[in-house]
Image: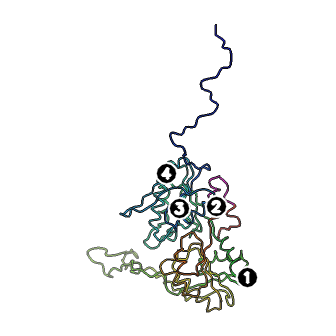
Amino acid sequence: MPIRRVGGHRSPFSYSHTPKLSYGYKNMNVSKSGYRVFSANSSTACTELAKKITERLGVELGKSLVYQESNGETRVDVKESVRGQDIFIIQTIPRDVNTAIMELLIMAYALKTSCAKNIIGVIPYFPYSKQCKMRKRGSIVCKLLAAMLAKAGLTHIITMDLHQKEIQGFFSFPVDNLRASPFLIQYIQEEIPDYRNAIIVAKSPSAAKRAQSYAERLRLGLAVMHGEAHQSELDMVDGRQSPPFSPPTTRTTQGHTGLELPCGRHHAPFPGIELPIMMAKEKPPITVVGDVGGRIAIIVDDIIDNVEDFVAAAEILKERGAYKIYIMATHGLLSADAPRIIEESAIDEVVVTNTVPHEVQKLQCPKIKTVDVSMILAEAIRRIHNGESMAYLFRNIAVDD
C-alpha cells in the first residue's frame, strides 16, 4: 500500500521566489524601454543633435567609440549589449561626407552582428541626395548609397526634406521623410517683425511648389525668379557636339564606309542620315515674376550650400525694391567661403535647421541663425519604437510640400 505522508509537503522544485541569473554581472545595463540611441560620430559638433534628442526622450546616449586609425580606416566599438533591442543611429553629416557614410555603415554592421532587433538610421540630411538623376555619363549615387545601407543592416530610415521625394523609391525598407517647414514657418511668424508685409520668393521655377506651400500657409504673396546670372552647367566635350559621319558620295570598292540606306528601285546609296539639330538652351538674365517692391523678401529652399546664386538673387530683389532679404533652408551646408560671402552680401539673415552641424560657420557670420528640429526627430523615434502611427507628424502636409 502506498504510504501516506502526514504534514505539509514541499516540493524540492518550488521556491518562494525565482532566483536571478546574473552570471557574475551585477548590472547588465539593459535599457528598460527596449531601445538604444547611438551617435555614429564622436565629434562634439556631430553629437550635439544626438544629445538633444536623447534629452527629449529621457534616455542616455548609447556608449560607443568611433574613431579614425592612423592609416585612415574607421573603427567602431560598441560598449554595451544591444541584443534584441531597437537601435537608432543618429548621424549628422559634417563636411567630410564620405567618412560620415563609412561611420554609419560600419556601426550599422557592428550592431547587426551584435544581434540588434531593428536598426533605424536617423539621418536628418541624406548625403548625395542631389545625385539622384542620371546626368550625361554619371551615375545615380543616391541609389548606390541606399543599397549599401540596406546591405549594412539598416531596416528603417528617418530623414528630413529629401532633395527629391522620389529618392524613397531607391530603398528596400521604409523611409520616413519628415518636414522642417512647420519650424521655419513658426520662426517667420515669431522672429520676423511685420512678416505680414513679406512675400515668399522661389529662387528658381523648380522651387515654386515649395514656395507656394509656404505662401499659402502664411497667407502671403508669391514671387518666382527665372533665369541665371551665369551658365551653371557648361557644355562638356563628350561627343554630343560631333555630327554624324558622312560617307563620300561615290561608292568605293571596299564597301560601305558609313551609314547608307537604299533608295529607289536600283537601291542607289546616299550619304548618312542628318539628324535635326537641337537648339542649345540659353537662359535669360534673372527676372522676377511678382511685385517685391517695399516688401520683405523670404527666399525658401531645401539646401543652401554654395551661396552665389542666393547672393545674386538677393541683389536682384534689392534692385526691385525689397528692403529686407531672408533665406530659409532646411539644410545649411554652407561650404567653402559661404559665411564670408553671406556677411558681405545684401542678405540680412540666413535661417537653417540643425540637421547639419554649422557652429563654425555661425562664428564666422552672425547673420546665420539656427532652428532646432530635435523635437520632431525624438517624437519619430518614440513612435517607431512603440509601433504608433506617424500620421500625426505629417498632418496638414500636402504631396508637394
Q: What amino acid type is highlighted by mark number 4?
A: Lys
Of callouts 4 and 2, which one flags the residue occurring earlier in the amino acid sequence? 2
Q: Which residue is mark 2?
A: 56
Q: Secondary structure at mark 1?
A: helix
Q: Main secondary structure of the magenta part?
A: helix
Q: CA distance from mark 1 to mark 3?
A: 40 Å
Q: Specify the quadrant of the image occupied by residue 325.
A: bottom right
Q: Is residue 375 above or below residue 23?
A: below
Residue at image point 67% right, 88% down: 292
Counting residues from the N terminus, which is met first, the one under dot 1 or under dot 4? 4
Which quadrant of the rendered structure holds the N terminus?
A: top right
Residue 243 falls within the magenta-colored stretch? no
* Residue pointed to by mark 3: 170
Which residue is under mark 4?
112
Q: How far, Cα to Cα, is label 3 from label 4? A: 21 Å
- Which of the two discs, 3 and 4, sits closer to the camera? 4
Residues drawn in magenta: 381-391
Amino acid identity at mark 3: Phe
> On the image, numbered disc 1 is attached to which residue?
196
